[in-house]
């Protein structure tokens, strides 16, 4: 595979890491385009401008955005967490591809606006429906956009390295424990975490219903 071409394609992508293209991130999408496994019009955040840049690079005719992957947003948006509803479940933290959400278990989470790519991946996992997208003022100069994309790429790559490191560390630690005990500990920890989250959801829903009796309840999340 032509690594230089992959890097050139990746440099033209917006680095939202949203997965709307059908791949796990911008780099895998770039690899698929280079290999002829994906078309140039599958990236909604890049919009028509992005498609035209890819077409020019690859020497192919531009084409309209394939809206089956989503629609282009002309303005930058970032995630916003409602502090009154957040229960500190950490699901959004784990979903963020660029580590732009900070917080700890059972504590309020907050979004680092400058680092958020607006990928929307944190919205669906939230059991309290307390995350929404809000527009932000932004300098649309090409240089500023390029810097933001480069920063998002670096943060995502760092996250992938961190997760891989944690995976190897956990695997190494498990080697020193009996398999049955390791599985039992993991199951017990998962069950405790699920119980804590469900209890927090119930308390939050009860508080919300007392404040606004006609408010629809938070969505239920069954997690195995």
Image: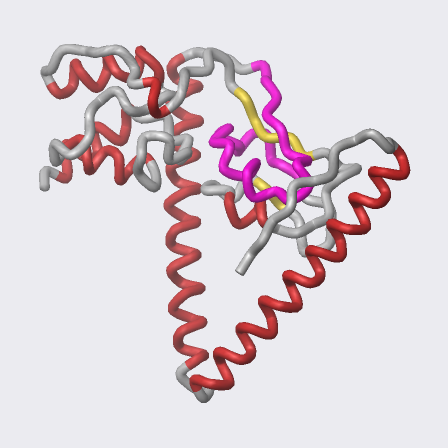
Residue 121 highlighted magenta (yes or no): yes
Vertical order, 161 against 186 (above or below) = above
Q: Could you tell whether 151 is left or right of 129 in the image? A: left
Q: Could you tell whether 196 is left or right of 42 in the image? A: right
**Which secondary structure class fits the magenta region best?**
loop
Residue at image position (46%, 15%) is 73
> As rendered, which of 44 and 202 lies closer to the eye?
202
> As rendered, which of 115 and 213 lies closer to the eye?
213
Residue 173 spot, x, y in % from top left: 45, 79
> As rendered, which of 214 and 179 lies closer to the eye?
214
Which quadrant is home to the N terminus? top left
Vertical order, 148 against 175 (above or below) = above
Residue 71 spot, x, y in % from top left: 41, 17
Residue 111 highlighted magenta (yes or no): yes
Residue 198 spot, x, y in % from top left: 70, 56
Vertical order, 33 against 159 (above or below) = above
Examine the rendering and report whether any part of residue 130 can be seen. Answer: yes
Task: Find the magenta span and give its range.
Answer: 110-137
């Amino acid at each position: 595979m032509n690594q230089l071409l992959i890097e050139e394609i990746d440099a033209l992508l917006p680095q939202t890491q949203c997965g709307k293209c059908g791949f796990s991130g911008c780099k895998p999408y770039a690899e698929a385009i280079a290999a002829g496994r994906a078309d140039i019009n599958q990236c909604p955040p890049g919009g028509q401008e992005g498609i035209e840049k890819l077409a020019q690079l690859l020497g192919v005719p531009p084409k309209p955005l394939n809206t089956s992957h989503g629609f282009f947003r002309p303005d930058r948006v970032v995630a916003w967490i409602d502090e009154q509803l957040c229960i500190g479940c950490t699901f959004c933290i784990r979903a963020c591809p660029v580590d732009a959400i900070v917080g700890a278990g059972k504590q309020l989470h907050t979004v680092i606006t400058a680092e958020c790519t607006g990928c929307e991946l944190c919205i669906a996992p939230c059991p309290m429906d307390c995350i929404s997208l809000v527009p932000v003022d932004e300098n649309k100069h090409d240089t500023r956009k390029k810097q933001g994309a480069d920063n998002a790429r670096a943060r995502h790559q760092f996250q992938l390295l961190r997760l891989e490191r944690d995976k190897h560390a956990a695997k190494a630690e498990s080697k020193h424990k009996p398999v049955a005990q390791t599985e039992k500990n993991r199951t017990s920890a998962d069950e405790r975490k699920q119980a804590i989250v469900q209890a927090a959801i119930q308390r939050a829903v009860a508080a919300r219903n007392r404040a606004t009796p006609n408010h629809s309840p938070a969505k239920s999340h069954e997690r195995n």
